[in-house]
Image (cartoon, grey):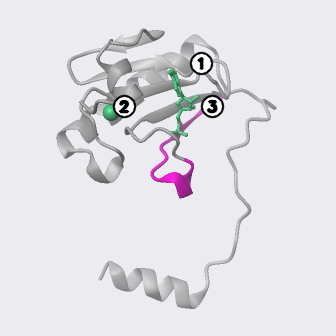
Amino acid sequence: MEDNCIFCKIARGDIPSATLYEDETLRVILDLGPASKGHALIIPKTHAANLFELPDEIVEKVFVAAKRIATQLKEGLHADGLNLVQNNGAAAGQTVDHFHIHLIPRYENDMVGITWKPGNLSEADKEDILKLFR
Ligand code: AMP
Ligand code: ZN
């Protein structure tokens, strides 16, 4: 637990939240600034700033929970789709430095903007990246 981490406090129940699910590893809450109806956050109880710091055994648990809660949200709210969003670092839009997964139910024509302008994969970039994995 980090002293000044709001998600540590929420995950452990020190700050009240609209909780959809809780177990010994994680808590699932409604986002206070929802992108759509049903926008929820999966927050592990162990502090890790981001995906890179999250222990593998917790990675497994949060993604299994994400699948289950996503299914419940999609079916219960009759959503047409659902985005999982998981930001790492300010450059990627992360504002709370405690790992979390966004579950964002999507509805036809909802105007929620999770999108980007497609570029072109250059030969140079492709080679650079493939080299890293050889
Ligand atoms: P991110 O930009 O990925 O770090 O997302 C942080 C998310 O946390 C945003 O969607 C906020 O609306 C949400 N948020 C911040 N504080 C709270 C809080 N106290 N309770 C619920 N959601 C929160
Ligand atoms: Zn924390």
Residue closest to the eye, 86 or 75: 86
Q: Is residue 65 left or right of residue 108?
A: left
- Asked if disc 2 is less than 8 Å from ligand 2, the answer is yes
Q: Residue at x 58, y 20 (%)?
A: 32
Q: Label 1 amino acid?
A: Gly
Q: Label 3 amino acid?
A: Gly
Q: Which residue is mark 2?
A: 5
Q: Residue at x 43, y 11 (%)?
A: 20
Mark pair 2, 1: CA separation: 24 Å
Q: Earlier in the sequence, mark 3 or mark 1?
A: 1
Q: Which quarter of the rendering shows the N terminus?
A: top left
Mark 3 Cα shell of 10 Å, populated few (<14), some (14-19), many (≥20): few
Q: Is residue 40 above or below residue 93?
A: above
Q: Residue at x 70, y 72 (%)?
A: 119
Q: Which residue is mark 1?
A: 38
Q: Is residue 116 left or right of residue 10?
A: right
State if disc 1 and disc 3 touch (CB < 8 Å).
no
**Which span is picked out in magenta?**
81-93
Q: Position of residue 50 (x, y in %)?
A: 36, 47
Outermost residue on the front side: it is 4
